Image (spheres, rainbow, N blue to C red):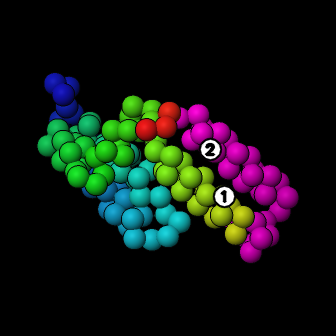
Amino acid sequence: MTNEPKGFSKSLHIFLGHFFVGLGFAGIILPLMPGTVFFIIAAYFYARGSKRFYNWLMNHPSIGLHIRNYQAGKITLKGKIISISSMSIAILVSIFLIGPPLWVTLILIACNLGVSIYILRLKTA
C-alpha cells in the first residue's frame, strides 16, 4: 500500500471503514441484516485508508475468512443457502405485508432473481 491517501481522504476512508464494521457487527445480531456485506465494504475502505485496520479485519478469526473467500470469488454452500433464503424471505414478507404496487413487486422479484443468480455462480468454497 504505497499509495495510501493523505489527510482528509485517509480520515474519511478510516471513518467509513469503522462505520461499516459497526453495521457488520449489528448485522451479526439483527435478523435479516447481512453482516458480511458490510464487512466487505469496510475492507474496501480500510484498504484505501489504513493498512493496520485492513490487516486487523482480514486477519480477524471469524470475519477475515469470509472476506478473503469473497475476494477470491468463493462462498460456502451454507453461505449461499442462508443469503438466498434470507433475501427471498425478506422480499416475500415485504410483498405480502406491505403490498407495494405491481411495478415495485416486479422490481423486487427481478433484484432477488439477479442477486440469487450472481450468488449461485460464485465458486463454492
Q: Is residue 107 magenta?
A: yes
Q: Nearer the viewer, residue 118 or 23?
A: 118
State left or right for residue 102 relative to residue 33: right
- The mark that comes first in sequence, 1 or 2, is 1
The quadrant in which residue 58 appears is top left
Q: Which residues are magenta?
A: 94-122
Q: Amino acid at mark 1?
A: Ser
Residue 45 placement (x, y as % from top left): 31, 42
The quadrant in which residue 40 appears is top left
Label of residue 36 in the image: none
**Which residue sits furthest bottom?**
97
Q: SS of the residue at dot 1?
A: helix
Residue hosting label 1: 88
Residue hosting label 2: 115
Residue 105 visible in this rendered orientation of the protein: yes
Residue 78 placement (x, y as % from top left): 49, 52
Q: State the residue at coordinates (50%, 70%).
A: 31
Q: SS of the residue at dot 2?
A: helix
Q: Nearer the viewer, residue 123 or 26?
A: 123
